[in-house]
Image (spheres, rainbow, N blue to C red):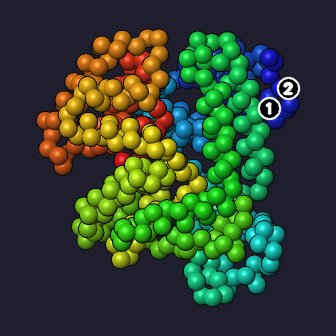
Amino acid sequence: MALSLKPEHLKRYTDIARLLIQHGRSDLVKTMDVDLPDDQVVEGAVTGDPEKLAQDLEALGPTFIKLGQLLSTRSDLLPAPYLDALARLQDKVEPFPFQEVEEIVSTEIGVRLSKAFLEFDPVPVAAASLGQVHRARLRSGREVAVKVQRPGIRQVILEDLDAFAQIAAMIDKHTEIGRRFAFQDMLEEFRKTLLRELDYRREAVSLVTLADNLREYRRLVVPRPVDDYTTSRVLTMDYVKGTKITELSPLALIDLDNRRLAEDLCKAYLDQILVDGFFHADPHPGNLLVTGDGRLALLDLGMVARIEPAMQEQLLKLLLAVTAGQGQQAAQVTLQIGTPLETLDEAHYRREVADLVGSFQSLSGEQIQVGRAVIHLARLSAENGVRPAPELTMMGRAL
């Protein structure tokens, strides 16, 4: 199978080849059946710096940023420092002109901006590679946030995904690491997730679902969408006033009942994962806002995940085993939900898990950080020849 020679694909092949070479995987570049210009590919020294990888992915644009965020959940593929660096990937770009915002919103909702909105701030409150958010006010007086998709971004992502898919096919066919990890399957799931994120109608449905599921949590807020002004490229929802938790001053933290907020958030995520089977899969600090009345708002539901009842049951067993210090039971569950590889020494693995779970028992119940414990288990699995279930790492990150 030869790689496509479309000009737009060739540019991406070069970007990917350069990235692989600079981060020590020139062996994978050799599988790419196309002549790439050496002067473009070989640029800069080989680095083993996780932060540099994160910076390089940020520079390459939205598809690479999203891929990095996906890789941050794959403890079977990358060592811990890389997972941590990729989990902190930032997606901030220059906003696109307000004239384009007007054109997109008017075309999508079918009326002029001035007719639909009493006010519409031309300066976005946030801008990312997929879209940007503007503060506005409806004719009814309701304050809203309007998320507008970046022009042409869908085509850019589709071309990137095509290039990724072809390279993944070559790696799977010609390398041992490809046969072990099935990058084509991973990329196909990534493709589905990213294309779903580009359909804002799906996010509107997710906002309603999550708000309904969390209605008993009075300290948690999920903005409600405005259906009449929401399409695949425009999402209109409640505007939530607040401060990102990363930007709170020390004085504000003192005034805030942060212990109860943290407890509510953790319980809410456990409910999402173990009861509802539907959860906010991108809970980084930038998506959490503290409101003026001391509540916590959950924003940006472009990435959500669903967990089947059978997997929910296994994850619950695992959490109970970890908190009860039952190492053998924890090992058994990870083996059942994961994928054992040829390198697995099961007896050794079970001992390692028992030791890890036992180490948590030296902590009091309040000191056991469940999310960190699950992440440690996922990493231990990967190091010992068990490919962890994606749900395991997602749960660990969320908690």
Above or below: residue 246 compared with residue 81: below
**Residue 371 placement, left or right of 342:** left
SS category of the residue bearing label 2: loop
In the rendered image, the quadrant that contains the N terminus is top right
Residue 230 coordinates in the image, percent (x, y): 69, 69
Taking the image as shown, residue 213 lies to the left or right of residue 145, namely left
Q: Would you say the residues marked 2 and 1 are in contact, meaning their CB atoms lie under 8 Å apart?
A: yes
Q: Residues within 10 Å of mark 1 (few under 14, many from 20)?
A: some
> Residue, x 65% and y 66% (percent of image)?
235
Residue 131: image quadrant is bottom right
Q: Residue at x 39, y 41 (%)?
A: 313
- In this view, the residue in front, 395 or 15, is 395
- Tell me the kind of residue under disc 2: Leu
The part of the image, by quadrant, that contains residue 169 is top right
Q: Secondary structure at mark 1?
A: helix
Question: Picture quarter containing residue 347?
Answer: top left
The kind of residue tagged 1 is His
The structure residue drawn at horizontal position 37% and vertical position 58%, both measured from the top left corner, is: 268
Residue placed furthest toward the right: 6
Which residue is disc 1 drawn over? Answer: 9
Q: Which mark is residue 5?
A: 2
x and y percentages locating residue 80 in the rendered image: 40, 30
- Please count the marks in the image: 2
Residue 316 position in % (x across, y down): 34, 42
Give the residue displayed 36% in from the left and 67% down from the top.
Answer: 217
Q: Is residue 102 visible?
A: no
